[in-house]
Amino acid sequence: MNRKRVAVLISGRGSNMAALIKAAQDPAFPAEIALVASNRPDAGGLAIARDAGIETEAIDHTRFGKDRPAFERALQDVLEAHRIELVCLAGFMRLLSPGFVETWQNRMLNIHPALLPAFKGLDTHRRALDAGAKVHGATVHFVVPEMDAGPIIMQGAVKVYADDTEAALADRVLAVEHRIYPLALQLVAQGRVEVADGHCLIDGQRVPEAGQLSPTED
Ligand code: GRF
């Protein structure tokens, strides 16, 4: 099997990255994590990746000042040097320019801790509670120039409870993130996801069960 070479881009603790690494340790998984790169040299996830025997690169964005194109050229060079075929953003806290995003069109995934298109941006769990949402969750989507938009590959939902706190809800959503990100990457790496009219089809279906993780009692 020709496993897709994947780079995971992180800025922080890297728990989603760790979930992807774990899934890819199975030789039957259709992708290998060939690189973990961070824009922050002190990102906790880098040590986790190194301990797992994965190559890492730190591309410190502060070295480039306001020169975003130079930062993105450096990033692109690193991705090319490692012959990367798919990119997974996992808590990567840098906006990417439209040009870079287009280079990776339908080959760059992101995970967002909400059921998009609800609650784009930050503080999603607090905002879901404030809004009185009854169900909350996480979304894996292809990256497009607009932030937290782009064709939805997979979503996972959790129930919201009456006595929920932001921290408790965040923990339950994170557990779902760790399940759906590897599943979504698997579908993409297997070539089962295509984008048509801005929507993802999985195995040619518009609302496939393979793209859904329903709320469970937890
Ligand atoms: C996750 O909640 C992810 O959805 C969001 O940033 C967070 C990253 O956490 N994009 P981690 O670094 O993967 O633990």
Image (tube, rainbow, N blue to C red):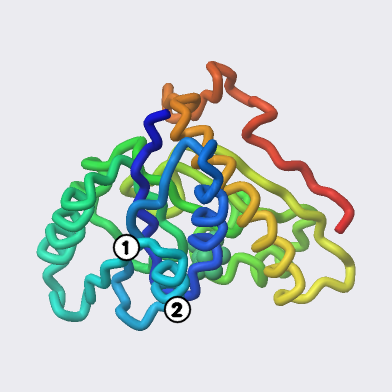
Q: Identity of the amino acid at label 2? A: Gly
Residue appearing at x 74%, y 68% in the figure: 169
Residue 45 higher or lower than 156, as above or below: below
In terms of image quadrants, where is residue 184?
A: top right
At which x and y percent is residue 12?
44, 74
Q: How many marks?
A: 2
> For mark 1, what is the residue?
55
Residue type pointed to by label 1: Glu
Quadrant position of the N terminus in the picture: top left
Residue at (62, 34) in percent of width and height: 211
Residue 70 can be seen, yes or no:
yes
Q: Nearer the viewer, residue 28 or 120?
A: 28
* Residue 88 placement (x, y as % from top left): 41, 51
Determine whether, in the image, residue 154 is placed left or right of residue 144. Answer: right
Residue linked to disc 2: 44
> Looking at the image, is 145 positioned above or below residue 218?
above
Q: Is residue 42 above or below residue 198?
A: below
Residue 116 seen in render? no
Please tell me which residue is depicted at 55% across the width and 67% down the height of the picture: 15
Foreground residue among 108 and 17? 17
Relative depth, front residue between 191 and 204:
191
